[in-house]
């Protein structure tokens, strides 16, 4: 009796497994005929536009002599006090994490600040007021400008950890500008930039051999430069050091992995 029962059980199990095997096969065939999916990847390098990196440049000489003289005249700062006050403000404008200890301290400075009623919360405003935004300089040779051939690329003055600097080729909004950060107002219309074709940022694709721009027109003999993504603000760890000469940066994109001469050799 038990043998017969066992045989029957095995027969049922075999039958059930064959049944489900056929069901699964049929549903696969059905899916193949009725629900097929095509996955394709289009790789057209010609359309891979990349924004060139931004450049932030901080002039190491900050305040403007004429504006400072005016400010001293209005506030009655004269003689030796003027030199002391200049030294204080210039170092304050140039101060950042690494050089806070350079800001001069003395009773004389405290006295001057007290006399003119200058409060610490207004230091940045005074520095801003005594700094010329050189992107508005009428003379083109002395204007801070960013160019690619005959095209202007927008440059703006920004407030950073390193004081007032200039930013070119950025995709950030106009709220990232010194005027907006200090006074809450958008930068004034720059008619000089609109004298030629103006773009906000420069793009290049893998196939263009030569995409470049130049940021120039600084009166300060020493400059501090930072390169960063056009989508970001300047970062202290991308500092390229002080320079007194013109500098050429040659950024290389590591995102595109390809053989040399790929664009000419592949079919
Ligand atoms: C890439 O840039 C080129 C040149 O500026 C432009 O003609 C083209 O339309 C851009 N392509 C895309 C996909 O934005
Ligand atoms: C500004 O600070 C840097 C150090 O961060 C220093 O090398 C430079 O000489 C300073 N510039 C002036 C004008 O004091
Ligand atoms: C800076 O200049 C603005 C506009 O000219 C003026 O309203 C403001 O009082 C000045 N700030 C200081 C601290 O002198
Ligand atoms: C540009 O600046 C230099 C140095 O500050 C000055 O000598 C020259 O006259 C300026 N050029 C113009 C056209 O204003």
Image: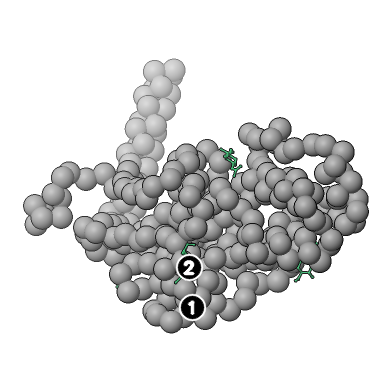
The residue tagged with tag 1: helix, strand or loop?
loop
Label 2 belongs to which residue? 143
Mark nearer the viewer, 2 or 1: 2
* Residue 186 location (% of width, % of height): 66, 72
* Residue 64 location (% of width, % of height): 63, 60
- Dot 2, crowdedness within 10 Å: few (<14), some or many (≥20)? some
> At x 79% / y 49%, what residue is drawn?
81
Tag 1 or tag 2, which sits nearer the N-term? 2
The residue tagged with tag 2: helix, strand or loop?
loop
Based on the displayed image, in which of its 4 quarters is residue 40 positioned? bottom left
Q: Residue 80 vs residue 215: left or right? A: right
> At x 91% / y 53%, what residue is drawn?
115
Mark identifier at residue 90:
none
- The residue closer to the viewer here, 10 or 253, is 253
Label 1 belongs to which residue? 192
> At x 45% / y 55%, what residue is drawn?
54
Q: Report the image quarter containing ligand 2.
A: top right
> At x 72% / y 48%, what residue is drawn?
83
- The residue closer to the viewer here, 139 or 184, is 139
- The residue closer to the viewer here, 51 or 199, is 199
Q: Residues under labels 2 and 1: Cα distance? A: 9 Å
């Amino acid at each position: 009796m038990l043998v017969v029962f066992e045989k029957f059980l095995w027969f049922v199990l075999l039958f059930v497994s064959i049944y489900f095997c056929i069901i699964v096969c049929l549903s696969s065939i059905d899916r193949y005929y009725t629900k097929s999916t095509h996955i394709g990847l289009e790789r057209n390098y010609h359309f891979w536009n990349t924004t060139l990196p931004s450049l932030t440049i901080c002039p190491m000489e900050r305040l403007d002599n004429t504006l400072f003289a005016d400010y001293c005249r209005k506030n009655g700062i004269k003689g030796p006090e003027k030199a002391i006050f200049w030294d204080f403000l210039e170092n304050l404008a140039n101060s950042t994490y690494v050089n806070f200890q350079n800001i001069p301290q003395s009773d004389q400075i405290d006295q001057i600040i007290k006399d003119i009623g200058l409060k610490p919360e207004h230091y940045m405003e005074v520095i801003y007021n005594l700094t010329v935004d050189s992107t508005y300089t009428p003379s083109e040779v002395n204007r801070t400008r960013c160019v690619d051939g005959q095209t202007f690329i927008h440059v703006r003055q920004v407030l950073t950890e390193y004081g007032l600097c200039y930013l070119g080729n950025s995709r950030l909004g106009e709220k990232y500008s010194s005027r907006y950060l200090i006074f809450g107002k958008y930068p004034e219309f720059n008619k000089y930039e609109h004298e030629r074709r103006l773009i906000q940022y420069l793009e290049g694709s893998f196939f263009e051999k030569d995409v470049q721009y130049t940021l120039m027109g600084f009166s300060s003999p020493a400059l501090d430069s930072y390169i960063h993504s056009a989508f970001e603000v300047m970062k202290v760890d991308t500092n390229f050091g002080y320079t007194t000469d013109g500098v050429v940066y040659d950024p290389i994109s590591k995102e595109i992995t390809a053989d040399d001469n790929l664009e000419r050799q592949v079919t």
